[in-house]
Amino acid sequence: MSLDDPSRATEVAVIDDHDVVHAGIEAWCAEADPEIRVVGSYLRPVDYLAAAPVADVVILGLQYGGTKPDFDTLRRLCAGGQRVIVYSHLTADEVILSCLDMGAVTYLVKSEGKRHLIDAVYAAQNETPHVGPRMGRALLNDSTLGRVKLSDREREVLVAWFQTESKELVGKRLYIAPTTVRTHLQRARAKYALVGRAAPTKSALLARAIEDGILSPNEL
């Protein structure tokens, strides 16, 4: 059965060093409709990487053993084209924004609960933005007067996408996976939506990019 089959259950892998987090996520997913199936639970990133399960979405805890945030694992997963939801108790804007810049599709604080996590999984699978309360606040704090602060990579992906016919061609041009291209576009849309300048279509996103000087019409 194809990974793009809409009738197939969404499959997630969970990486977190607390058993209670695994139990909670598995219970929430078991009640989800449409179906979400946990296909792997790992206490350490190294265990997940060794097992290399096939999952639509990875739910990643950001700290292990009380150490600093494990940004290296996040970068590695995102570089491999994984759709990663960071699920952490850390609430600092700089941590959240760093995770998004590294390629996470969304960032959730563990206190935000079941509904946000389930909605984030569906959004990641369907390549649509999901912005939890704390992530939204971090993005708004990073923007002023309706301007959207896109990362250099997001800008690069936007320009390449407007100049080509598909995400696959963007990936070839920039030497990144098509799933990574989709992640950057998804994040850019989320940032525009948060400042009241929604861009749900390619043409709308192009209009926003021209308004903000990211590219000019003669570059198309």
Image (spheres, rainbow, N blue to C red):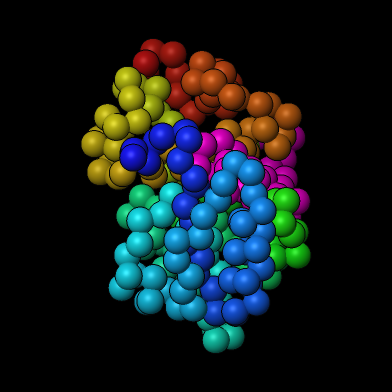
Q: Quadrant of the N terminus?
A: top left
Q: Quadrant of residue 130?
A: top right
Residue under the image location 35 percent in, 62 percent down? 53
Q: Which stretch is magenta?
A: 118-147
Q: How many marks?
A: 0
Q: Position of residue 125 (x, y in %)?
A: 50, 42
Q: Quadrant of the C terminus?
A: top left
Q: Position of residue 23 (x, y in %)?
A: 62, 71
The question of residue 126 being in magenta is answered with yes
28 is higher (above) or lower (below) than 210: below
Residue under the image location 55 percent in, 86 percent down? 65
Q: Quadrant of residue 163?
A: top left
The majority secondary structure of the magenta stretch comes to: helix
Apparent side of residue 2 relative to residue 212 in the rendered image (left or right): left
211 or 193: which is nearer to us? Answer: 193
| Residue 184 shows in this picture | no
60 is higher (above) or lower (below) than 123: below
Apparent side of residue 21 relative to residue 104 in the rendered image (left or right): right
Extreme residue toward the top, this view: 218
The question of residue 66 being in magenta is answered with no
Residue under the image location 75 percent in, 65 percent down? 111
Apparent side of residue 32 relative to residue 80 in the rendered image (left or right): right
Q: Quadrant of residue 177?
A: top left
| Residue 13 shows in this picture | yes
Apparent side of residue 7 relative to residue 77 in the rendered image (left or right): right
155 is higher (above) or lower (below) than 213: below
189 or 146: which is nearer to us? Answer: 189
Residue under the image location 35 percent in, 56 percent down? 54
Q: Position of residue 140 (x, y in %)?
A: 72, 45
Q: Position of residue 67 (x, y in %)?
A: 54, 84
